[in-house]
Image (cartoon, helix red, strand yellow):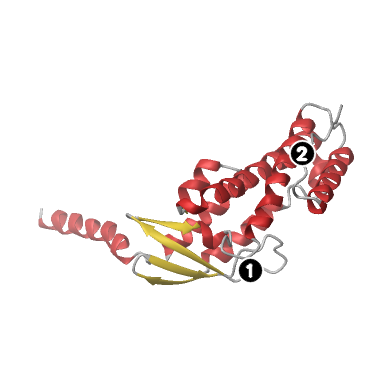
Amino acid sequence: MRKQALLFTGLIALLTVPAFAANPADAPRQALITFADAAHAGDVKAMNDTLYIAPANKDQVATLVAMYQATAQLRQAMLAKFGDEATRAGWAGVDAALDTRKKALANAEVKIDGDHAVLTIATPSGDDNKLPREITCVKVGESWKIDAASIFALNEPKANESIARLKKMTELFNNVAKDVGNGNLGTMQAAQRALAEGAKATLDNPASTTHSATRP
């Protein structure tokens, strides 16, 4: 009986030690990894759940989150419609880039000061979707959330100008994804051309209206 009691006590100790030994830096890192997965999937709720959004930034963040959603939906539409052709053109390549980025996030240096944490991230070589080198997280209750102003660089001088362009790009991506899905853009070349022309128009005049890729 004594041996069984000692064994039981030992098992309890083994089960409870990890909870006390967990690295405090892991939670802010995991918040960033969760956001990366959610952004890749275009999951609006999951993205918002990882973010700390100041009231003044609510509309800006909504635009940026919608851009991630539109990007994911466009990628899915291209791969579903054009299969291997879209894969060869690089539409599936973001999966590998995501894995590389998540490894960088998992290795981020974390400095915690009370309810704030600053993560220093080494951007992976060849990663075109660069994150800021430093990202701030805020502890809300028992959860760490990413400061949206930090990860999206909302305090930069030209942030609003960039967001205006991204809003038009979101509209473009949604239109092209719709036209790919309904067959109005029947080839990958046509879809790529619609994207290129729409992107050029947006960059030349971000205030212009982005029409559907197939105009009457």
Looking at the image, residue 138 sits to the left or right of residue 195; the answer is: left
* Label ID, residue 123: 1
Structural distance between the alpha carbons of marks 2 and 1: 28 Å
- Residue drawn at 82 percent across, 35 percent down: 213
Crowding at label 1, few (<14), some or many (≥20) Cα neighbours within 10 Å?
some
Q: Position of residue 38 (x, y in %)?
A: 56, 47
Assign the C terminus to one quadrant of the image: top right
57 versus 101 height, above or below: above
* Label ID, residue 7: none
Looking at the image, residue 67 sits to the left or right of residue 11; the answer is: right
Front-most of 191 and 169?
169
Mark 1, secondary structure of its residue: loop
Labels 2 and 1: the sequence-earlier one: 2
Looking at the image, residue 116 sits to the left or right of residue 189; the answer is: left
Provide the residue designation for mark 2.
78
- Residue drawn at 16 percent across, 54 percent down: 4
Crowding at label 2, few (<14), some or many (≥20) Cα neighbours within 10 Å?
many
Label 1 sits on what residue type? Answer: Thr
Q: Position of residue 194 (x, y in %)?
A: 85, 41
- Residue drawn at 52 percent across, 53 percent down: 57
Label 2 sits on what residue type? Answer: Met
Looking at the image, residue 45 sits to the left or right of residue 124; the answer is: left
Q: Position of residue 115 (x, y in %)?
A: 35, 65
